[in-house]
Image (cartoon, helix red, strand yellow):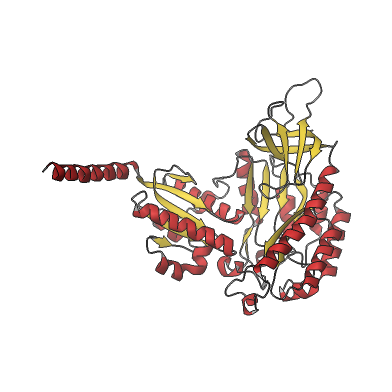
Amino acid sequence: MHSLLSQQFISLQAKIDQILKTKKIKPEKVNVITLGCSKNIVDSENLISQLRANSVEVEHEESESDAGVVVVNTCGFIDLAKEESINTILEYAEYKKQGNIEKLYVTGCLSERYMDDLQLEIPEVDGFFGTLDLPALLSRFNADYKHDLIGERVITTPPHYAYLKISEGCNRTCSFCAIPLMRGKHVSKPIEELVKEAKGLAKRGVKELMLIAQELTYYGLDIYKKRMLPELLTELGRVEGIEWIRLHYAYPNKFPVEVFEVMRESSAICNYLDIPLQHASDRMLKSMQRQSTRAEISTLINKARERVPGLTMRTTMIVGFPGETEEDFQELCEFIEWARFDRLGVFQYSHEEDTSAHLLVDDVPAEVKEDRARRLMEIQRQISLEKNTEKVGKTLKVLFDRKEGQWFIGRTEADSPEVDNEVLVDANEQFVRIGDFARVKITEASDYDLFGTLVYPPKDNTISHAGN
């Protein structure tokens, strides 16, 4: 009898524990999890803004959340990103089984691309939504899509910088890329809408805007019948409070060179250009359907540097594309040594379903892809070290993002958050407010970072906010 009572007590206690656990969950509260690129960050920020405008309590990526609903915004770009997205969905599906959350929704690129398969494989998910299904997702919360929220977007980045998505989708047909399958055709946002959004962000303390799109240089062709990136930059450069505007993801083919004139003339437009080139072998560029030759790319680089002295150029390259020979790779290495990019990212080719490159044989072994990526980054490491060493003794304007351990960590005009170099100042010796600009004299350089000391204005112990 005693044993039976003990068992009943344990069973009752387990039920009580489960009830108490359930009571701790707020079924009406939402936790949004964002995976992937900066474009996904903006999508999550728009979702959060819409939910809050409908009086829904929502948070972003809270690890100790009491939210009863989780929305996972997924990435489906390459194999590693897809694996991370699937693992995250499975993790929250398990939370749901354990009673830690009540509802689980999945949105974003992976959901757009593999919705039918995901519904079969992960039935614990209460709903899958594509990249353009925001109104349908909002309906699950009895929330209406509000069109009047332009300029009032919640930002999940540090409050002094934000991403500004100027268009959605892509009309390019690069053979390796599945983005058009997930994001659709190119759709530009009107200039007046983007300016209004930028002004709203500036009023809330944003000092730096990163312009993003699948392809910046195509901007305006659909609604204005001409490439309007220069005109957009001119208008954004006039927004009071925005000190830095930087350009990400500019396609090299038919690049609107008027951008360089605006960049040179406007103090708000950073001398910074992110221009993914992907390769330098004409044979590979043709197979990738990039619509540019090595000679055309080289001409554009020379023109950019002539028109904007001191321009920082970031690019990305793909190694291991089907058919890439050692000779093709050597051409790429020689090009990197010639171009001497300030920033470089390298991707190992991922064989993506439903792309035209998927019809080719993925014939470069994984170990060769890895070795080529390593060799290319070793060339870039030396270039980066040489360029950083040239900055020792110079005083640079730096925007400080955060403090980690003994270091205040910031960035120069030549650096975008998370992907580029950083400037470190010893917090044991000096102080600067996060989100402020300051002048820093560079005292030491490593491969990818700079170290320095704050330069104070004469007869003043405060930090210069404008970096003057």
Vertical relation: 286 (above or below) 155: below
Q: Determine the residue located farthest toward the right in the rendered image.
A: 306
Q: Determine the residue located farthest toward the top in the rendered image.
A: 459
Which residue is at a point 65% across and 36% down the rendered structure image?
A: 435
Vertical relation: 287 (above or below) 28: below
Q: Is residue 27 left or right of residue 374?
A: left
Q: Position of residue 431 (x, y in %)?
A: 69, 27
Vertical relation: 279 (above or below) 361: above
Q: Position of residue 143 (x, y in %)?
A: 41, 53
How many marks on residues? 0
Q: Is residue 334 left or right of residue 106?
A: right
Which residue is at a point 72% across and 44% down the rendered structure image?
A: 244
Q: Quadrant of the N terminus?
A: top left
Q: Nearer the viewer, residue 238 or 432?
A: 432
Vertical relation: 30 (above or below) 360: above
Q: Position of residue 429 (x, y in %)?
A: 72, 25
Q: Is residue 4 left or right of residue 435?
A: left
Q: Is residue 274 visible?
A: yes
Q: Is residue 141 visible?
A: no
Q: Position of residue 38 (x, y in %)?
A: 61, 53
